[in-house]
Amino acid sequence: MHDEAASTAEAVEAPSAPARSRSNIEVLIPTFNEELNIEHALRSVVEWADRVVVVDSESSDRTREIAEEMGAEVIVQPWLGYARQKNWALANGGFEADWTFILDADEQITEELRDELLAIAAKPSSEVEQAGFYINRLTFFMGKPIRYCGFFPSYNLRFFKRGSAEYEEREVHEHMVVNGPTARLRYMMLHNDRRGLEHFIAKHNRYSTLEARELVKEGRSKAKRATNLERGIALRRWLKHSVQPRLPLPGFWRFAYTYIVRLGFLDGINGLRFSLFLATYDFFIAIKLAELKGARADRPAEAPPDLVKGIKPKRPSEQPSRVADEPAPALQESPKTGPTDALANPQRTGDWRPLTLADKDTTPKAPISIVVLTYQEEINIRACLESIAWCDDVHVLDSGSSDRTAEIARKMGAQVHVNPFKSFGQQRNWAIDNISCKHRWHFHLDADERFTPALAEELNKRLTETEASDGSHAFRCPSMMVFMDQWLRHAAEYPVYQVRLFDSENCRFEDFGHGQREVCEGPIGTLENPYLHYNFSKGIEEWFDKHNRYSTLEATQARQQPSAGLMTQIRGVFSGDSTDKRRALKSLSYRVPMRSSLVLMYTMLFRRGFLDGKAGLNYARMRAIYEGMISVKLSVQKHRVSMGREESDEGHRA
């Protein structure tokens, strides 16, 4: 085996081979927003390949500019899909050499592999028995090579006689099907994506969605799968299709295999992180497969049976207020007891189903103005506005959606305002300052949330036109999360309170992490009845994509907040000020090892998430993944700062 120490990323930065007039090899590089990678890929081929063709999928960065400056021929083709894009390029790229090499923009050809390719191409193609060759690939993760974890060696067919190969019609993880015999080459190429950890997670989130679609498609059509794949690839394909979907605890087995059986622990902390991400990827596939097969993450049109039972929520003394969409940290705040006058005569719970247009005339019309915050919400906005059709002053504050959100809102009678999004706190304050609302009392609602009859009735009873009946300037409101067709009473820690109803003359918002928190000049009351939160109405892929971004913001906030000693943080936990207490708890939680595992155990055991069944387990694992993303990104950011390198919110960059 080739000495890997000689095959570092630096080894191909400046090829020493002299320019050749004819190598008999042309290189195809598909791209989309690859400005951080494309230069490295091109440097490994432009000095010796007869022709380098970059087929770009309408990049919005400098990818095409860099490629042209380095001598590549650039062709722009709107995205067709992974397999179809490459097959289109092979058919329309004007290739004339006997041999073609397909190189991804985040890959590089080593000097040793280059010489091996040139030696093959120097022979008359008729004298070469093989029609294609598999190339070993060494993957870098967070800047370091992965030599174990079952990820090395990793063979991909990339070098083939012109016209003898094409990609199978598959949405993701497509492989080449070759018309003729194949063999493996000795030397390797390098795989080193410099776009960072957030991009890595987002990419595999998309891949897992496509993989789940492929599994559903193959299961329904019984379509014939490619059989002439390299033996290792064929085995992985069979396991993924026939074995993995039937295993319990998806992801666990992948971790055990990569980290223990395939010696991932020999790759150190990076091996542990890489194995955990591979396990997470398998979990992504499994939960999205369940979603596609009918256990939809969200069905807003019809309330699950549990939502109408009128189960009385715990009081705020048993549950702290939390930032919107923020999973609970490993350490929980000792909550502040809500105002006693608001709880002295708690209202009986009632109808907790989502309101519809049919309820418009019978719903009490509370004297409030409702502002709905939106961005790309055409899938949610109609049902949201139907649940507040009884309100006589509805506004939609949109952050510049390019879909039909604003159009649908206007057709349904809402007043639409547009303000570019900067932060959640800024957006809510903009609404207070710039929207001429009819009523002094405002209720802020997200597009994936729905009013319930009981909540509308309670608001009508509590408020007058000028002041709250108990003197409060704002009210916390509980939310009920719906996931996989059921209310997550335990795993989602119901009730989670947020200030949504407030006197617009006495309340503002400030940014906090990826969310916001209220700053009110008077007491804050508590509502008894909830609104419904369909957090997964856009699908599980969107949830992970959103929380991937949130985790970057959380990690950045954790790193940038003023440092405090351990004892100072512990004393803050016992502070009488709820804001100081919450900050101390969050800061202290970042010191806890195995934070994601603790969150999983906390949710399933302490919060009794197991009582929510499979939906509770899946949600608990999703929260644990979120906490894991925060921990890894925080570690990476701190390491980069300690090394004096340019800060990045995503992880490694070369």
Image: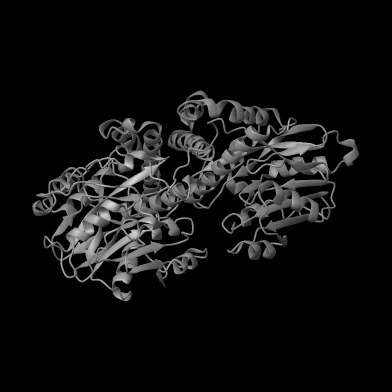
Q: Is residue 19 left or right of residue 349?
A: right
Pick the front one: 234 or 500: 500
Give the residue at x 61% y 49%.
106
Is residue 118 among what the camera can see? yes
The outermost residue toward the top is 261
Q: Is residue 36 left or right of residue 228?
A: left
Give the residue at x 70% y 57%.
54
Q: In x, y percent, where is residue 302?
A: 41, 46
Pick the front one: 14 or 606: 606
Q: In x, y percent, where is residue 343?
A: 12, 50
Q: Is residue 50 left or right of residue 153?
A: right
Q: In x, y percent, where is residue 281?
A: 50, 38
Is residue 631 among what the camera can see? no
Q: Is residue 400 above or below residue 495?
A: below
Give the residue at x 48% y 65%.
408
Q: In x, y percent, where is residue 637?
A: 39, 51
